[in-house]
Image: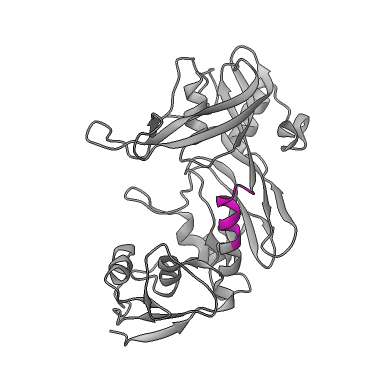
Amino acid sequence: MKPVETVAVLPEDGEVRLDRWLRRRYPHLTQGQLGRMIRTGQVRVDGARAKENDRVRPGQSVRIPPVPEESKSVDVHAITPEETVFVQSLVIHRDDDVLVLNKPHGLAVQGGAKTGRHLDLLLDGLKFEYDARPKLVHRLDRDTTGCLVLARTPRAAAAMAKSFKARETTKVYWAVVLGCPRPPEGEIRGWLKKSTGPLESDREMVRQARHGEQDALFAITDYVALSEAYPKAAWMALKPVTGRTHQLRFHMAGIGHAILGDMKYKCELPTPGALSERLHLHARAIDIPHPVKGNVRVVAPLPPHMKKTFESLGFDESDAKDPFKAFK
Protein backbone atom coordinates (compact mmCIF):
# COMPACT_ATOMS: atom_id res chain seq x y z
CA MET A 1 0.00 0.00 0.00
CA LYS A 2 1.11 3.53 -0.75
CA PRO A 3 0.85 5.87 2.29
CA VAL A 4 -1.58 8.76 2.62
CA GLU A 5 -0.38 11.66 0.48
CA THR A 6 -1.46 15.17 -0.40
CA VAL A 7 -0.93 16.05 -4.03
CA ALA A 8 -1.13 19.48 -5.67
CA VAL A 9 -3.09 19.91 -8.89
CA LEU A 10 -0.57 21.31 -11.36
CA PRO A 11 -1.11 23.87 -14.16
CA GLU A 12 -0.43 21.22 -16.79
CA ASP A 13 -3.26 19.10 -15.32
CA GLY A 14 -5.80 21.73 -16.41
CA GLU A 15 -9.33 21.78 -14.99
CA VAL A 16 -10.71 18.26 -14.91
CA ARG A 17 -13.18 16.00 -13.10
CA LEU A 18 -11.80 14.59 -9.85
CA ASP A 19 -12.30 10.96 -10.85
CA ARG A 20 -10.50 11.51 -14.16
CA TRP A 21 -7.63 13.31 -12.43
CA LEU A 22 -7.24 10.32 -10.10
CA ARG A 23 -7.47 7.86 -12.99
CA ARG A 24 -4.49 9.54 -14.65
CA ARG A 25 -2.40 9.08 -11.49
CA TYR A 26 -3.57 5.55 -10.74
CA PRO A 27 -4.43 3.86 -14.05
CA HIS A 28 -4.18 0.43 -12.38
CA LEU A 29 -7.22 1.20 -10.19
CA THR A 30 -10.72 0.57 -11.54
CA GLN A 31 -13.39 3.25 -11.82
CA GLY A 32 -15.26 1.42 -9.08
CA GLN A 33 -12.31 1.55 -6.68
CA LEU A 34 -11.81 5.25 -7.30
CA GLY A 35 -15.53 5.94 -6.92
CA ARG A 36 -15.67 4.20 -3.53
CA MET A 37 -12.66 6.16 -2.29
CA ILE A 38 -14.38 9.42 -3.20
CA ARG A 39 -17.88 8.52 -1.97
CA THR A 40 -16.60 7.37 1.43
CA GLY A 41 -14.79 10.65 2.00
CA GLN A 42 -11.28 9.21 1.84
CA VAL A 43 -10.42 11.62 -0.97
CA ARG A 44 -10.63 15.29 0.01
CA VAL A 45 -10.07 18.45 -2.01
CA ASP A 46 -8.65 21.36 -0.02
CA GLY A 47 -9.73 19.50 3.12
CA ALA A 48 -13.37 19.06 2.06
CA ARG A 49 -15.33 16.02 0.88
CA ALA A 50 -15.93 15.89 -2.85
CA LYS A 51 -17.96 14.11 -5.49
CA GLU A 52 -16.72 12.13 -8.48
CA ASN A 53 -17.88 14.78 -10.94
CA ASP A 54 -16.47 17.75 -8.99
CA ARG A 55 -13.81 19.56 -10.95
CA VAL A 56 -10.31 20.15 -9.58
CA ARG A 57 -8.23 23.15 -10.64
CA PRO A 58 -4.54 24.07 -10.60
CA GLY A 59 -3.47 25.15 -7.13
CA GLN A 60 -5.86 22.88 -5.24
CA SER A 61 -4.61 20.06 -2.97
CA VAL A 62 -6.02 16.55 -3.05
CA ARG A 63 -5.72 14.20 -0.07
CA ILE A 64 -5.33 10.63 -1.32
CA PRO A 65 -5.71 7.62 1.03
CA PRO A 66 -3.48 4.53 0.94
CA VAL A 67 -3.93 2.81 -2.41
CA PRO A 68 -2.77 -0.64 -3.56
CA GLU A 69 0.50 -0.80 -5.43
CA GLU A 70 0.28 -1.75 -9.09
CA SER A 71 0.54 -5.50 -9.37
CA LYS A 72 3.74 -6.69 -11.00
CA SER A 73 1.90 -9.69 -12.40
CA VAL A 74 -0.46 -7.58 -14.49
CA ASP A 75 -0.05 -8.38 -18.17
CA VAL A 76 0.61 -4.92 -19.57
CA HIS A 77 0.56 -4.70 -23.34
CA ALA A 78 3.97 -3.70 -24.64
CA ILE A 79 3.57 -2.06 -28.02
CA THR A 80 5.67 -3.65 -30.76
CA PRO A 81 7.71 -1.76 -33.38
CA GLU A 82 5.22 -2.92 -36.02
CA GLU A 83 2.30 -1.56 -34.00
CA THR A 84 4.13 1.73 -33.50
CA VAL A 85 4.65 2.09 -37.25
CA PHE A 86 0.99 1.24 -37.85
CA VAL A 87 -0.51 3.70 -35.37
CA GLN A 88 1.84 6.50 -36.41
CA SER A 89 0.81 5.95 -40.03
CA LEU A 90 -2.71 7.03 -39.03
CA VAL A 91 -1.64 10.55 -37.97
CA ILE A 92 -2.94 13.27 -40.30
CA HIS A 93 -2.34 16.24 -37.97
CA ARG A 94 0.23 16.77 -35.25
CA ASP A 95 1.25 19.77 -33.17
CA ASP A 96 2.41 20.34 -29.59
CA ASP A 97 -1.09 19.87 -28.16
CA VAL A 98 -3.23 17.92 -30.63
CA LEU A 99 -3.12 14.79 -32.74
CA VAL A 100 -5.74 13.83 -35.33
CA LEU A 101 -5.86 10.30 -36.69
CA ASN A 102 -7.60 8.87 -39.73
CA LYS A 103 -9.06 5.84 -37.97
CA PRO A 104 -9.43 2.78 -40.20
CA HIS A 105 -12.44 0.48 -40.45
CA GLY A 106 -12.55 -2.27 -37.83
CA LEU A 107 -10.28 -0.67 -35.24
CA ALA A 108 -12.12 -0.18 -31.95
CA VAL A 109 -11.25 2.96 -30.02
CA GLN A 110 -11.40 1.25 -26.62
CA GLY A 111 -11.53 -2.32 -25.39
CA GLY A 112 -14.56 -4.44 -24.59
CA ALA A 113 -15.60 -8.00 -23.86
CA LYS A 114 -15.20 -9.10 -27.48
CA THR A 115 -12.44 -6.69 -28.50
CA GLY A 116 -8.83 -7.73 -29.01
CA ARG A 117 -6.60 -5.03 -30.42
CA HIS A 118 -7.93 -1.52 -29.94
CA LEU A 119 -6.56 2.00 -30.24
CA ASP A 120 -6.25 2.56 -26.50
CA LEU A 121 -3.66 -0.27 -26.42
CA LEU A 122 -1.62 1.48 -29.08
CA LEU A 123 -1.41 5.00 -27.63
CA ASP A 124 2.14 4.48 -26.35
CA GLY A 125 3.14 4.52 -30.01
CA LEU A 126 1.91 8.12 -30.27
CA LYS A 127 4.03 9.66 -27.51
CA PHE A 128 6.64 10.92 -29.98
CA GLU A 129 8.83 13.39 -28.03
CA TYR A 130 6.58 13.35 -24.93
CA ASP A 131 6.75 11.00 -21.94
CA ALA A 132 2.98 10.80 -21.52
CA ARG A 133 0.65 9.00 -23.90
CA PRO A 134 -2.06 11.12 -25.58
CA LYS A 135 -5.66 11.05 -24.39
CA LEU A 136 -8.75 10.28 -26.46
CA VAL A 137 -11.03 13.32 -26.61
CA HIS A 138 -14.03 11.61 -28.25
CA ARG A 139 -14.90 8.28 -29.84
CA LEU A 140 -15.88 6.73 -33.14
CA ASP A 141 -17.67 3.41 -33.60
CA ARG A 142 -15.39 0.51 -34.46
CA ASP A 143 -16.50 0.41 -38.10
CA THR A 144 -16.70 4.18 -38.60
CA THR A 145 -13.60 5.66 -40.22
CA GLY A 146 -12.05 9.12 -40.25
CA CYS A 147 -11.08 12.02 -37.98
CA LEU A 148 -10.37 11.08 -34.39
CA VAL A 149 -8.92 13.73 -32.07
CA LEU A 150 -6.43 13.11 -29.27
CA ALA A 151 -4.99 15.56 -26.74
CA ARG A 152 -1.28 15.43 -26.02
CA THR A 153 -1.45 17.20 -22.64
CA PRO A 154 -3.98 17.25 -19.77
CA ARG A 155 -4.60 20.95 -20.38
CA ALA A 156 -5.40 20.30 -24.05
CA ALA A 157 -7.69 17.41 -23.06
CA ALA A 158 -9.66 19.64 -20.69
CA ALA A 159 -9.95 22.46 -23.24
CA MET A 160 -11.14 20.24 -26.07
CA ALA A 161 -13.55 18.34 -23.84
CA LYS A 162 -15.16 21.70 -23.06
CA SER A 163 -15.36 22.49 -26.77
CA PHE A 164 -17.21 19.25 -27.48
CA LYS A 165 -19.56 19.79 -24.55
CA ALA A 166 -20.30 23.38 -25.59
CA ARG A 167 -20.89 22.30 -29.22
CA GLU A 168 -18.09 24.54 -30.44
CA THR A 169 -16.79 21.70 -32.58
CA THR A 170 -18.06 21.14 -36.12
CA LYS A 171 -17.93 17.58 -37.48
CA VAL A 172 -18.94 16.57 -40.99
CA TYR A 173 -19.42 12.92 -41.92
CA TRP A 174 -19.74 11.41 -45.38
CA ALA A 175 -21.96 8.39 -45.88
CA VAL A 176 -23.38 6.29 -48.68
CA VAL A 177 -27.02 5.48 -47.95
CA LEU A 178 -29.54 3.18 -49.55
CA GLY A 179 -31.94 4.99 -51.86
CA CYS A 180 -32.21 8.74 -52.28
CA PRO A 181 -33.72 10.76 -49.40
CA ARG A 182 -36.55 13.18 -50.14
CA PRO A 183 -36.21 16.03 -49.54
CA PRO A 184 -32.51 15.81 -50.45
CA GLU A 185 -31.54 18.07 -47.55
CA GLY A 186 -33.01 18.79 -44.17
CA GLU A 187 -32.87 18.21 -40.45
CA ILE A 188 -33.74 15.12 -38.43
CA ARG A 189 -34.88 15.60 -34.84
CA GLY A 190 -36.06 13.20 -32.18
CA TRP A 191 -35.58 11.54 -28.82
CA LEU A 192 -33.51 8.39 -28.44
CA LYS A 193 -32.04 6.31 -25.65
CA LYS A 194 -29.77 3.31 -25.20
CA SER A 195 -31.46 -0.08 -25.20
CA THR A 196 -31.84 -1.63 -21.75
CA GLY A 197 -33.80 -4.42 -20.14
CA PRO A 198 -34.31 -8.14 -20.80
CA LEU A 199 -36.24 -7.59 -24.03
CA GLU A 200 -33.55 -5.31 -25.44
CA SER A 201 -30.48 -7.46 -25.13
CA ASP A 202 -28.23 -5.40 -27.41
CA ARG A 203 -27.01 -2.60 -25.18
CA GLU A 204 -24.86 -1.37 -28.05
CA MET A 205 -27.93 0.00 -29.82
CA VAL A 206 -30.23 2.97 -29.36
CA ARG A 207 -33.97 3.12 -29.92
CA GLN A 208 -36.64 5.77 -30.36
CA ALA A 209 -37.82 7.35 -27.12
CA ARG A 210 -40.47 9.78 -25.93
CA HIS A 211 -40.03 13.24 -24.49
CA GLY A 212 -39.84 12.91 -20.72
CA GLU A 213 -38.83 9.25 -20.81
CA GLN A 214 -36.05 8.41 -18.36
CA ASP A 215 -32.55 8.66 -19.89
CA ALA A 216 -33.97 9.93 -23.20
CA LEU A 217 -31.71 12.33 -25.10
CA PHE A 218 -32.68 14.76 -27.84
CA ALA A 219 -30.69 14.36 -31.06
CA ILE A 220 -30.39 16.63 -34.11
CA THR A 221 -28.75 15.78 -37.45
CA ASP A 222 -28.43 18.03 -40.50
CA TYR A 223 -28.09 16.24 -43.83
CA VAL A 224 -27.43 17.10 -47.49
CA ALA A 225 -27.35 14.80 -50.51
CA LEU A 226 -24.14 15.62 -52.40
CA SER A 227 -24.79 13.23 -55.29
CA GLU A 228 -27.19 10.45 -56.26
CA ALA A 229 -27.00 7.19 -58.14
CA TYR A 230 -30.77 7.19 -58.51
CA PRO A 231 -32.60 5.16 -57.30
CA LYS A 232 -29.97 2.88 -55.73
CA ALA A 233 -27.92 5.06 -53.39
CA ALA A 234 -26.89 8.57 -52.41
CA TRP A 235 -23.70 10.20 -51.18
CA MET A 236 -24.62 12.17 -48.08
CA ALA A 237 -22.97 14.83 -45.94
CA LEU A 238 -24.14 14.54 -42.33
CA LYS A 239 -23.56 17.02 -39.52
CA PRO A 240 -24.43 15.89 -35.99
CA VAL A 241 -25.56 18.98 -34.11
CA THR A 242 -25.71 16.81 -31.00
CA GLY A 243 -23.31 13.97 -30.28
CA ARG A 244 -25.36 10.94 -29.28
CA THR A 245 -24.35 7.29 -29.53
CA HIS A 246 -25.09 5.92 -33.03
CA GLN A 247 -27.03 9.09 -33.81
CA LEU A 248 -26.26 9.28 -37.53
CA ARG A 249 -26.86 5.59 -38.13
CA PHE A 250 -30.14 5.63 -36.20
CA HIS A 251 -31.40 8.78 -37.88
CA MET A 252 -30.68 7.67 -41.44
CA ALA A 253 -32.34 4.29 -40.91
CA GLY A 254 -35.22 6.12 -39.22
CA ILE A 255 -36.03 8.10 -42.39
CA GLY A 256 -35.87 4.91 -44.45
CA HIS A 257 -32.35 5.31 -45.88
CA ALA A 258 -29.95 3.21 -43.82
CA ILE A 259 -26.20 3.62 -44.27
CA LEU A 260 -24.72 1.05 -46.63
CA GLY A 261 -23.15 -1.79 -44.67
CA ASP A 262 -24.91 -1.05 -41.38
CA MET A 263 -25.82 -4.39 -39.82
CA LYS A 264 -27.61 -2.87 -36.80
CA TYR A 265 -29.76 -0.07 -38.16
CA LYS A 266 -31.52 -1.23 -41.30
CA CYS A 267 -34.32 -0.19 -43.65
CA GLU A 268 -36.46 -1.93 -46.26
CA LEU A 269 -34.49 -0.77 -49.31
CA PRO A 270 -32.29 -3.35 -51.09
CA THR A 271 -28.51 -3.14 -51.07
CA PRO A 272 -27.02 -2.66 -54.55
CA GLY A 273 -25.04 -5.68 -55.67
CA ALA A 274 -21.23 -5.89 -55.95
CA LEU A 275 -20.60 -3.23 -53.28
CA SER A 276 -18.54 -3.61 -50.13
CA GLU A 277 -20.50 -4.81 -47.09
CA ARG A 278 -18.43 -2.63 -44.76
CA LEU A 279 -20.05 0.34 -43.03
CA HIS A 280 -19.94 3.40 -45.28
CA LEU A 281 -19.70 6.12 -42.63
CA HIS A 282 -16.63 8.35 -42.57
CA ALA A 283 -15.76 11.27 -40.27
CA ARG A 284 -14.62 13.37 -43.19
CA ALA A 285 -13.69 16.62 -41.44
CA ILE A 286 -13.48 18.28 -38.05
CA ASP A 287 -13.07 21.90 -36.99
CA ILE A 288 -12.30 22.32 -33.28
CA PRO A 289 -10.93 25.25 -31.26
CA HIS A 290 -7.23 24.72 -30.61
CA PRO A 291 -6.32 24.59 -26.89
CA VAL A 292 -3.85 27.48 -27.37
CA LYS A 293 -4.82 29.56 -30.40
CA GLY A 294 -7.05 29.40 -33.46
CA ASN A 295 -8.71 26.23 -34.71
CA VAL A 296 -7.65 22.77 -35.80
CA ARG A 297 -9.33 22.03 -39.14
CA VAL A 298 -8.58 18.61 -40.63
CA VAL A 299 -9.94 16.56 -43.55
CA ALA A 300 -9.48 12.77 -43.59
CA PRO A 301 -9.02 10.87 -46.87
CA LEU A 302 -11.68 8.27 -47.70
CA PRO A 303 -11.01 4.64 -46.71
CA PRO A 304 -10.35 2.16 -49.54
CA HIS A 305 -13.79 0.50 -49.42
CA MET A 306 -15.59 3.84 -49.76
CA LYS A 307 -13.28 4.94 -52.58
CA LYS A 308 -14.19 1.77 -54.46
CA THR A 309 -17.91 2.32 -53.86
CA PHE A 310 -17.64 5.93 -55.06
CA GLU A 311 -16.06 4.67 -58.28
CA SER A 312 -18.76 2.01 -58.73
CA LEU A 313 -21.62 4.50 -58.23
CA GLY A 314 -20.04 7.37 -60.18
CA PHE A 315 -19.46 9.70 -57.22
CA ASP A 316 -16.53 12.14 -57.51
CA GLU A 317 -15.23 13.34 -54.15
CA SER A 318 -13.63 16.37 -55.83
CA ASP A 319 -17.20 17.70 -56.29
CA ALA A 320 -17.12 18.52 -52.56
CA LYS A 321 -13.64 19.94 -52.00
CA ASP A 322 -14.75 21.81 -48.88
CA PRO A 323 -16.67 19.34 -46.66
CA PHE A 324 -18.09 22.17 -44.53
CA LYS A 325 -19.58 24.07 -47.48
CA ALA A 326 -22.76 21.99 -47.58
CA PHE A 327 -23.78 23.38 -44.19
CA LYS A 328 -22.75 27.04 -44.58
Q: Tell me which residue sits at (68%, 55%) in the image.
A: 289
In the picture shown, does residue 283 fall above or below 3? above
The answer to whether any part of residue 261 appears in the image is: no
Residue 27 in the image, given as x and y percentages of width and height: 39, 70
Q: Which residues are magenta?
A: 159-168
Coordinates of residue 34 in the picture (x, y in percent) = 33, 68
Say if 79 sits above or below 234 in the image. Answer: below
Q: Main secondary structure of the magenta part?
A: helix
Position of residue 279 measured from the top left corner of the image (x, y, whole percent): 51, 33
Pick the front one: 93 or 80:
93
Image quadrant in which the N terminus is located: bottom left
What sort of colour scheme is used for the picture?
one colour
Q: Residue at the far top: name it.
A: 231
Image quadrant where residue 228 sits: top right
Q: As displayed, is residue 131 above or below residue 213?
A: below
Of 154 and 118, the residue lying toward us: 154
Which image quadrant: the C terminus? Answer: top right
The residue depicted at 68 percent of the width and 68 percent of the height is 96
Q: Is residue 36 located in the magenta-colored stretch of the structure?
A: no
Q: Is residue 39 visible?
A: yes
Q: Is residue 244 left or right of residue 172?
A: left
Which residue does the image show at 39% across and 74% down from the upper left? 26
